[in-house]
Amino acid sequence: MAQRTSADSGPLTLFVCTGNFYRSRHAEALFNWHATRAGHPARAFSRGLLTSLVADEPTLLSRDTERRLRELGIPLELTGAAPTQLRREDLERAHRTIALKKDEHHAMMLQAHPEWADRIEYWSVHDIDCAHPDQALPQIEEQVLELMRTLRI
């Protein structure tokens, strides 16, 4: 669902985090669920800046993200199938790009995609090393809903 097709003419929002395993995947699924329910063509997809960090994980999606999406009744199919590395083409394809934590991701963007580092938006959602998922995931939910209000979805 997150991939753009010729039949999908809606704007694309790209969520970026470190591993594309937890925060960005939650934002992606939540955005797609609300947009679909509203009958709006906007969609989201997500990518990671350093997906090698999650290469040895036993699952393709954070168990915390999976648990929270199930609690909300959001199908797991509304997020990507597996962690995916951010590429220049992704940045070019997106209408809006949001990295989940500026303190963490701005330097990574400068390293990987310096020409884009100051052209994207940044939120301040901590990763699991600084905030428990019971705090971080609802914060993402609030920010996605606010984003959708600003986009009039």
Image: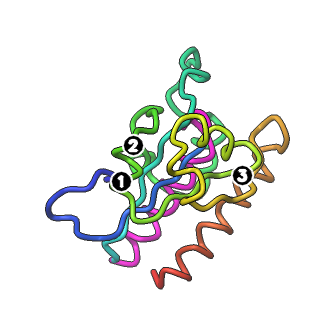
Q: Which residues are magenta?
A: 18-39
151 vs 67: above or below: below
Q: Is residue 28 magenta?
A: yes
Secondary structure under badge 3? helix
148 vs 108: above or below: below
Is residue 72 rendered to the left or right of residue 139? left
Secondary structure under badge 1? helix
Query: Disc 3 residue type?
Result: Lys
Secondary structure under badge 2? helix
Q: Nearer the viewer, residue 55 or 81?
A: 55
User: Which residue is at 55% across, 82% downward?
Assistant: 150
Percent coordinates x, y for residue 47 in the rendering: 48, 42
User: Which residue is at 52% across, 60% downward?
Assistant: 30
Q: Nearer the viewer, residue 54 or 60?
A: 54
The residue tagged 2 is 88
Q: Please identify the residue farthest to the right as the structure is shown.
A: 130
Disc sitting over residue 18 in the figure = none
Q: Please identify the residue farthest to the left as the structure is shown.
A: 6
Q: Please identify the residue farthest to the front as the structure is shown.
A: 115
User: Which residue is at 55% across, 47% downward?
Assistant: 16
The residue tagged 3 is 102
Query: Disc 1 residue type?
Result: Glu
Question: Which of the 4 quarters of the picture holds residue 80?
Answer: top left
Distance of mark 1 from mark 3, alpha carbons?
20 Å
Disc sitting over residue 92 in the figure = 1
Distance of mark 3 from mark 2, alpha carbons?
19 Å
Percent coordinates x, y for residue 46 in the rendering: 47, 47
Quarter of the figure that contains the C terminus: bottom left
Q: Nearer the viewer, residue 119 or 100?
A: 119
Q: Residues within 10 Å of mark 1 (few under 14, many from 20)?
A: few
Percent coordinates x, y for residue 135 in the rendering: 80, 53
Is residue 122 rendered to the left or right of residue 14? right
